[in-house]
Image (tube, rainbow, N blue to C red):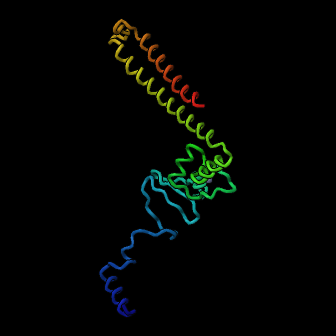
Amino acid sequence: MSKKLKNVKAVREMIAGTHKTQTKTNISFGEKKTFVKREVGEKWTDDDGVLWEQKKGYKVKLGKLSKLRNELTKFPNCKKEICTCTNPKRNDIKMKTIHGMCFDCVIDMEHQHKVDGTYKEYEREKIYANMKSWLKGAEIEKEALKTALKAKFVNEDGSIEEWNEMSWEDVEKKIDNEFRLFKENYLKKWEDKK
Ligand SMILES: [Zn+2]
């Protein structure tokens, strides 16, 4: 389009009120002294890299974005000299909860174990840690089961009913005992494989 035609087009748009300077509603990032209406909960960064959040009727300073990002991407067990993880992905976050390291550093660490001949031991420890965390979950479920069962023993007046000639205390003892045995066997299997 020639310059002249462009100007004609601009003038036409101006008259119609559709020129971009007339319809612009979103103030773009970086333009100062312009009031931008924010929704409650909206977060934005100003020109100085400071992150803000809009609350009901006021805004709060969340801090420098770079600093916040650093917090999020802190991997306490990564080797500072070799770690290059500056933009963590899902894999890195997953490894962070297990090892406190980014994915690459875990690979490196496991490789080092292989080189040192300590990989088997490392793997065993890892499996053991998994087993223990699984048992912890099972224990919570057991307690939930007990609570649910106990409710069936309680009469409307609050007294506790006997059930199949077993008292609630007997049932509770039985559940705890069974679980303890299960737990011991479960861990013993692992011990035996040493
Ligand atoms: Zn790392």
Say if 172 sits above or below 60 in the image: above
Residue at image location 43% in from the left, 61% down from the top: 37
Q: Position of residue 65 (x, y in %)?
A: 57, 58
Say if 81 sits above or below 20 in the image: above
Residue at image location 50% in from the left, 54% down from the top: 53
Residue at image location 39% in from the left, 73% down from the top: 24
Q: Position of residue 161 (x, y in %)?
A: 35, 9
On the image, which quarter does residue 126 sit in? top right
Q: For this rendering, which residue is in front, 192 or 20? A: 192
On the image, which quarter does residue 17 sit in? bottom left
Q: For this rendering, which residue is in front, 137 or 113? A: 113
Say if 57 sits above or below 138 in the image: below
Quadrant where the N terminus sits is bottom left
On the image, which quarter does residue 46 sit in? bottom right
Q: Position of residue 43 (x, y in %)?
A: 48, 56
Q: Position of residue 163 (x, y in %)?
A: 34, 9
Q: For this rendering, which residue is in front, 117 or 107? A: 117
Q: Relative to residue 7, is residue 189 drawn left or right? A: right
Q: Relative to residue 73, is residue 43 drawn left or right? A: left
